[in-house]
Image (cartoon, grey):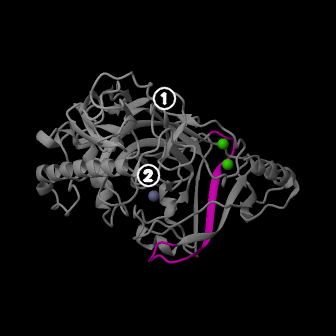
Amino acid sequence: MTTHLARLRSSVGPLACVAVLGAAGAAAAAPGPGLMPDLVADPPVGPVTSVEPVHGRPGHRLLLRFDGHVHNIGPGRLEIVGQRPAGSYGDDTLRMTDVRQRIYDASGALVDELPSPAVVPHAGPHASDRHRHWHTDRATAYWLVEGEGLADVVESDKVGFCLADSTPIEAPDDEPPRYWASHCRGLDAAGRSLDYAQSMDAATVVMGISPGFRDLYAARYFTQWVDLTGRVAPGRYRLKAVADPTGAIAEADEDNAPAYSTPFALRGWLAQPVAAAPAPSGAPQRIALTARAVVGAGLPAGDPYLGEPDPAMFVLATPPAHGTVTISGDVATYTPAPGHAGPDRFAVAALEEESALAAPPATVDVGVLPGPAAAAPPAPPAPPVARPQGRPGPAGRPGGARFRLSAAQLLINQRIGQAAIRRLAAVAAALHGAADRGPAADQPAHRPGGGAAGERPGGAGRRLTARGLRYGGRSSAGEAGDVCPSCARSTSSSPS
Ligand SMILES: [Ca+2]
Ligand SMILES: [Ca+2]
Ligand SMILES: [Zn+2]
C-alpha cells in the first residue's frame, strides 16, 4: 500500500515544474501540487437476505445484500480514464487497455496522469449484470466477518461499478456532481457522448468521484452481496468494507482502517457436542441431542432470517466407525457393532427447515463397556471432544475454518438448502408469477417492486418475503434493458 504513496511522492513532488500534460486549455503558468484522492469505505448498511437465481450458478442462492459506499475524503479528485479498448464485445472481454489516473491541482489544472492497473471492463450483453456501460472493478471489497472477533468468514462476490458522484457528504449540498453515471457510457473518437447501445464502441471513458462525494453501491445491484448458501452458519456477524482492496488507485492515504456494519444475526440452530456416558456392550444407547438457538436480529422486518428459529431438525452428518445411528426427533440411537468395545464417535447437525444456511456438525462421543451387558468396571472417560463452537470459515480454506465441514455434511446442507429454496420458489411462482411475465422453469417470476409490501405467503412459503423476492426478480430477470439503477437515476437528472 505504501508503495503507491512513495511512488506518488516521488512523482507528484516535482510536478509543479513539469509541463502540464493534456488539457491544453488548462496550461496555466505554474500548476500547483497535485491533490490526491483518499478513498474510504463507509460502513455497509441494511443487510437483507434474498433468495434468487444467480447467473452462472446452479439453482437458487441465499444472498445477503447490503448497501455500500466508497467515499472520497481526500483533497483531490479520483478520476480514472480508459482508452483504446481491446477484446470482444460479444464474449464480454472488452477492456480499456490504456488506463490512467488523472491528478489535478487546486485550480483544477491537470498536472499528471499515472499509468493505472485499475481494470476498466465493459459490462456487455453477456455480462451477468448487462449494465451496458463501463465499470472500474474492485473499487471496494466486502467480507462477512464474525460479529465479535471480526475474523473473516467469507468474502463477497467481486464488485465493479461505474464510479460517480452519487451523494455530496462533505461537499456542499448544492455543489453539482462532476462525475455522472452517464459518463460511463463513454465517448467516441470525436469526443461525442454515447448511449447504452453504442457504449461498446467507446474510444474513451472517464469516471471518478469528487472530493467530499461518495458513490453508492445499492443492495439491489448485481454482485452487491455475500453468497451464504450452505457455507455460512447461523450466528452473529458484521460486514466489513475495504476501499481499493487491490491497491490499484493512488491515494493520499493508502492505509485507512476497514469499515464495519453494526452487528446482525442470522437465525437458526447450532448443534452442540455431546459426551454420552459409556453403556454396556451390544445394547443400543439413546442419546439426547441439543442445539443452541440463534435468534435473528438486525435485519429488516419480515426478513426470513429474523427472529426465533423454527424447531431444530437433527440429521446424521458423519456415521460412527463401530456401529450405527438412527435419529428420531432430538434422540440419537447408537447401536454398537457386535463385539465392539471402547470409544466411538459420530457427528450430527441441527437444521431449521427451509433454511439454506450451513449446519455445522457437532460430535457425539459414546463409549461401549467391554464384555456382555453385565456389571463391568467403568470405562475410562471419553477422550476430549473437539468443540465445534463458533462460526464456520470457508470450508477447505487452510487456517480459515474453525471446523471442517465433511463432504457428507456439505451434501446435506446443499440438498436441504436447495430443496427448501425450490419449494420457496415454487410457492412464489404460484403466488406471484401469473401476474408478471410467466415464470421461467426455475425462477421466481417476481419483478422489482411487483409485490405488495409485507405480503407473506402461507404454508411452506411463509419465509419467502416480498422483499427477498424483489431482489430475486431484479437480478434474475436481467432483461436487456436493465441498467444499473444509479445510472438510471443520475441519467434522468444529468445535464448532458
Ligand atoms: Ca484511502
Ligand atoms: Ca489505494
Ligand atoms: Zn453499472
Residue segment shown in magenta: 73-93
Count of number-bearing discs: 2
Looking at the image, tell me whether mark 1 or mark 2 is earlier in sequence order. Answer: 1
Residue 343 shown left or right of residue 312 in the figure: right
Q: Residues within 10 Å of mark 1 (few under 14, many from 20)?
A: few
Distance from Cα at disc 1 to Cα at disc 2 = 61 Å
Question: Picture coordinates of residue 322 (x, y %)?
Answer: 35, 43
Nearest the viewer among 331 and 406 is: 331
Tell me if residue 82 is in the magenta stretch: yes
Instruction: Provide the secondary structure element on which disc 2 rests.
Output: helix
Write down the residue under mark 1.
384
Instruction: Provide the secondary structure element on which disc 1 rests.
Output: loop
Write down the residue under mark 2.
490
Question: Picture coordinates of residue 111 (x, y %)?
Answer: 77, 56
* Some atom of ligand 3 lies within 8 Å of the CB belonging to the residue at label 2: no
Residue 439 shown left or right of residue 95 in the figure: left
Tell me if residue 14 is in the magenta stretch: no
Residue at (84, 55) in percent of width and height? 29
Q: Amino acid at mark 2?
A: Ser
Question: Picture coordinates of residue 190 (x, y %)?
Answer: 58, 75
